[in-house]
Image: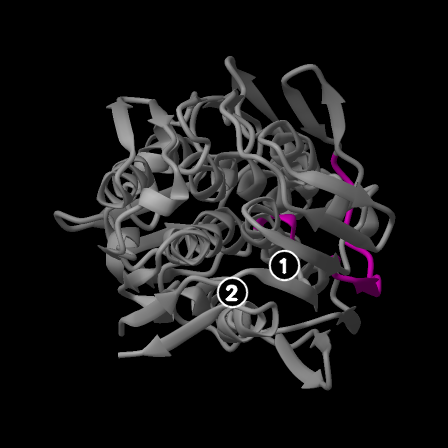
Amino acid sequence: MKCQIKPARFSGSVICPPSKAVFHRAAICAALSGERCMIDNYIPCEDVSATLEILNMAGFSHSVESDRLIIEPGKYRGGAITADCRESGSTLRFLIPVLGALGIPVTFIGKGRLCVRPMDIYEKLLPQHGLSFSHGTEILPLKIEGKLTGGCFLLDGGVSSQFISGLLMAMPLLDTASSVQIVPPFESTPYVSMTIDMMAKFGVDVKVDGDSFYVPSGQAYRPADIVCEGDWSAAAFFIAAGLLGGDIKLLGLRADTIQGDAAALDIFAALGANIKADNNCVAIYSGRPRGMTVDVADIPDMVPAICAAAAFAKGETTHIINAGRLRLKESDRLAACAENLRRLGCDVVEEAASLHITGIDRKTANAAGLCGYNDHRIVMAFAVALSAANGGTISDMHAVEKSYPAFWEHFGTLGGIYNVI
């Protein structure tokens, strides 16, 4: 589905959606606690719904009351299950070790690029700890059998942090003390910190020693009720919109968060935005976009929003470095961003793990036909970019359902103009 976007100036306020990264972790820890738990500020999206449906199949249950998710213990009925991860990498990589630790035989299925996203870390490591893997020419369908055993898990720190988080969440279910040791360089560390923080909320202590993580034996998840905080990854798109010409207030964001993408405050301030933040509101006022160098090793999801702002840093170059893992997301995000930026008229140098973007005057930007690449973050970022310049079209507008179902509603509330075509 494609939409036509017209030039617009953003203003007003919206409440940011709950963090899907936080919610995945909270739902899994709550289910494993064995008692009734409540998670407030629940707004369903495709990725979180996939996790909840698979937890249901594994014997847990959930219900929804207004914006509250209630997770209750159930009973695994036995036998193999088929788990549809849709396009959620978090769902797949978190639940392989968790369901493996529970001894549940599973065939994981999915769609899109999830079927080919790398799983060799688990495929090489987990058979050493009791799980068997089998799949065809693509990663999915993937069948696992056996029961995960404890010990030391050695992982390359340059891979997705989802592998590390999945193992950590499984470890309290194992019979022996276990550890994850990271071979540096260790990237996306804030996501692992988020996992450890959530496990602590549910009563599990993870010992941290440099790049090693140790879960002592004898621990178990305990029930907890939590409120899911707002999503800084989602907020980044409208922070970019504010920089490019707006007066926007984003509500529901915690200033004391451990979400890595809260780095958006410093990054977009350096890119030229005027930002004021307190513990529940971030106000963004327009500024003159300027170039900079951004190391995104720990914040890869920020890249499309950064590109939207960098496109209009007239005559200045933004260097996005340490971004190689973006080639393995819902799309090859480096290639997708580079192509859309070129269609707008920007000069872009694309390297294996970096982009170098020379910005243009937005008045001269092409009213371009852009591709969403069926990638939620590409769609949201370049919808903002088109609004800030001379408009145009973007395909795959439905892709936002993956993480931010209310995006187009909020886009319109803040003054964005679009029509489905």
Question: Which residue bears the numbered disc 2?
Answer: 51
Q: Left or right: where does residue 295 sit relative to residue 174?
A: left
**Res 197 quadrant in image:** top right
Q: Which residues are magenta?
A: 217-233
Displayed quadrant of residue 204: top right
Q: Are marks 1 and 2 in contact (CB under 8 Å)?
A: yes
Q: Position of residue 112 (x, y in %)?
A: 25, 59
CA gap, disc 1 and disc 2: 8 Å
Q: Is residue 227 magenta?
A: yes
Residue at which label 1 appears: 28
Q: Quadrant of the N terminus?
A: bottom left
- How busy is the neighbourhood of tag 2: few (under 14 within 10 Å), some, or many (20 plus)? many
Query: Could you tell me the amino acid type at mark 1?
Result: Ile
On-image quarter of the C terminus: bottom left
Q: Which residue is drawn at the image coordinates 65% and 36% (left, top)?
A: 260
- Is 110 in the magenta? no
Q: Would residue 82 be seen by someone viewing this image from the given angle?
A: no
Under circle 1, the secondary element is helix
User: 131 or 62: which is nearer to us?
Assistant: 62
